[in-house]
Image (cartoon, rainbow, N blue to C red):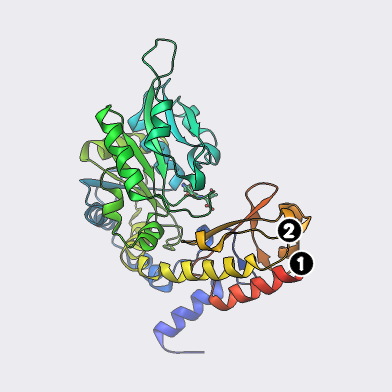
């Protein structure tokens, strides 16, 4: 047994990991690092609903600084972040224009209807990218019987579209044109640090024209819990009200904030490694009979590929992977999604390709 404190800590973290499988289901499965666990144990805390938690206040300040926005607020999940933002920007009975595979309408339990009383007005965009030319046509005319457009929502990177990066000039044009019409634009930037890595831009530049941005600490950045909203001070003051209404007002949450600070400051620097691993997987998969993927399009840590040519559906494909201790899931009957992250090494990716080759014979 090691007596070195750092080594011992690393070993303990290692022992806590249920590492029997290679888990490609999502980057949400990442384990907090040993440094995060130490910071959580030592965090200085107080009641955050009173606004007194020093660690949480530091996280809010740093997030606002990094994103060059007036203010920020921690929320327990990306879902709550998106839905609080939507509630802030809209009124009941309005429409939200978005891409048809947007996370907030497909995987957030219809909260947009239940909490904000809005309906989505969707558009299909190649690789998840919608343009102002498309959006313009969906903006409701001012007829009394038409639900009025209340918000435009974009996603960067696209979760269900294969980690796709939203081009900055397209997003800028949407924000400028929407603002001219008095419409706000929200960015679901759950993986904005992956986008920033792929685009070679700071997150502040990507976020600049958006009225609000949600980003996750708990995905590729490895924090155990939490997401953040950034925007104007008035927006964040309003978000605090709706966060409380949704049950997201937490007390000594600096325990989570301590891990969040490390996620924010230290973890973005390693995301390129996940992107390189995703590309390696994509290139290997492209050579396997029955699988279809354009490896050149894989720029971040998510890859979506068709398995139609294998004769299996995604349930059978996932089951066969699972039998070989590789965890992954389909996004529908025909398309699988793999997500790389801090707990998947390059060597693991080699093993995954071997397993896939084995089940596609
Ligand atoms: N996405 C999860 C699942 O819900 C699919 C994943 O594994 O990718 N926005 C985007 C773009 C997301 O991908 C997610 C999570 C969220 C919001 C919601 O975040 P959480 O899970 O923290 O509520």
Name the residue furthest front.
133
Q: Secondary structure at mark 1?
A: helix
Residue 317 is marked as 2
Question: Residue 359, which numbered label?
Answer: 1
**Considering depth in this image, is 190 or 136 the residue closer to the camera?**
136
Q: Is residue 344 left or right of residue 181?
A: right
Q: Residues within 10 Å of mark 2 (few under 14, many from 20)?
A: many
200 lies above or below 238: below
Contact between marks 2 and 1 (CB within 8 A): the answer is yes
Q: Position of residue 317 (x, y in %)?
A: 73, 58
Closer to the camera in the image, 320 or 242: 320
Residue at 27% of width from left, 47% of height from top?
A: 72
Q: Quadrant of the C terminus?
A: bottom right
Q: Is residue 20 above or below residue 101?
A: below
Q: Residue at x 38, y 54 (%)?
A: 192
Q: Neighbour class for label 1 at 10 Å: few (<14), some, many (≥20)?
A: few
Q: Earlier in the sequence, mark 2 or mark 1?
A: 2
Relative placement, left or right, of 316 versus 169 is: right
Residue 280 appears at what percent x and percent y? 55, 71
Which labelled disc corresponds to residue 304? none
Residue 16 shows in this picture: yes
At 27% from the left and 27% from the top, the residue drawn is 182
Q: Quadrant location of residue 118?
A: top left
Identify the residue at the far top of this view. Answer: 144
Q: CA distance from mark 2 to mark 1?
A: 8 Å
Task: Measuring from the top left, give residue 6's x and y in whole percent.
Answer: 40, 83
Q: Residue at x 37, y 35 (%)?
A: 132
Tell me: residue 100, above or below residue 326: above
């Amino acid at each position: 047994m090691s007596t070195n404190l750092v080594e011992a800590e690393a070993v303990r973290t290692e022992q806590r990991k249920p590492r029997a499988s290679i888990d490609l289901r999502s980057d949400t499965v990442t384990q907090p690092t040993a440094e995060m666990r130490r910071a959580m144990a030592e965090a200085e805390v107080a009641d955050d609903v009173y606004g007194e938690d020093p660690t949480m206040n530091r996280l809010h300040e740093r997030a606002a600084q990094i994103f060059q926005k007036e203010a920020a607020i921690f929320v327990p999940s990306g879902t709550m972040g998106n839905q609080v933002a939507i509630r802030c920007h809209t009124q009941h009975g309005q429409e939200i224009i978005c891409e048809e595979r947007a996370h907030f309408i497909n995987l957030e339990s219809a909260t947009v209807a239940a909490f904000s009383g809005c309906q989505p007005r969707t558009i299909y965009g190649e690789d998840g990218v919608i343009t102002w030319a498309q959006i313009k046509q969906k903006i409701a005319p001012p007829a009394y019987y038409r639900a009025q457009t209340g918000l435009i929502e974009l996603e960067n990177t696209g979760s269900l579209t294969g980690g796709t990066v939203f081009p900055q000039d397209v997003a800028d044009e949407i924000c400028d044109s929407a603002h001219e019409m008095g419409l706000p634009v929200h960015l679901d930037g759950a993986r904005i640090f992956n986008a920033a890595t792929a685009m070679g831009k700071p997150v502040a530049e990507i976020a600049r024209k958006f009225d609000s941005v949600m980003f996750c600490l708990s995905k590729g950045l490895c924090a155990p819990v939490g997401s953040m909203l950034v925007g104007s001070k008035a927006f964040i003051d309003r978000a605090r009200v709706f966060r409380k209404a949704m049950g997201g007002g937490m007390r000594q949450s600096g325990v989570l904030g301590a891990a969040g600070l490390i996620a924010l400051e230290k973890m973005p620097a390693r995301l390129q490694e996940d992107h390189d691993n995703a590309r390696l997987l994509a290139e290997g998969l492209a050579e396997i009979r029955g699988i279809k993927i354009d490896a050149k399009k894989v720029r971040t840590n998510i890859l979506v590929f068709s398995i139609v040519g294998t004769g299996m559906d995604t349930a059978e494909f996932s089951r066969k992977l699972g039998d070989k201790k590789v965890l992954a899931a389909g996004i529908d009957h025909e398309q699988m999604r793999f997500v790389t992250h801090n707990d998947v090494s390059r060597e693991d990716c080699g093993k995954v390709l071997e397993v896939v080759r084995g089940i596609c014979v």
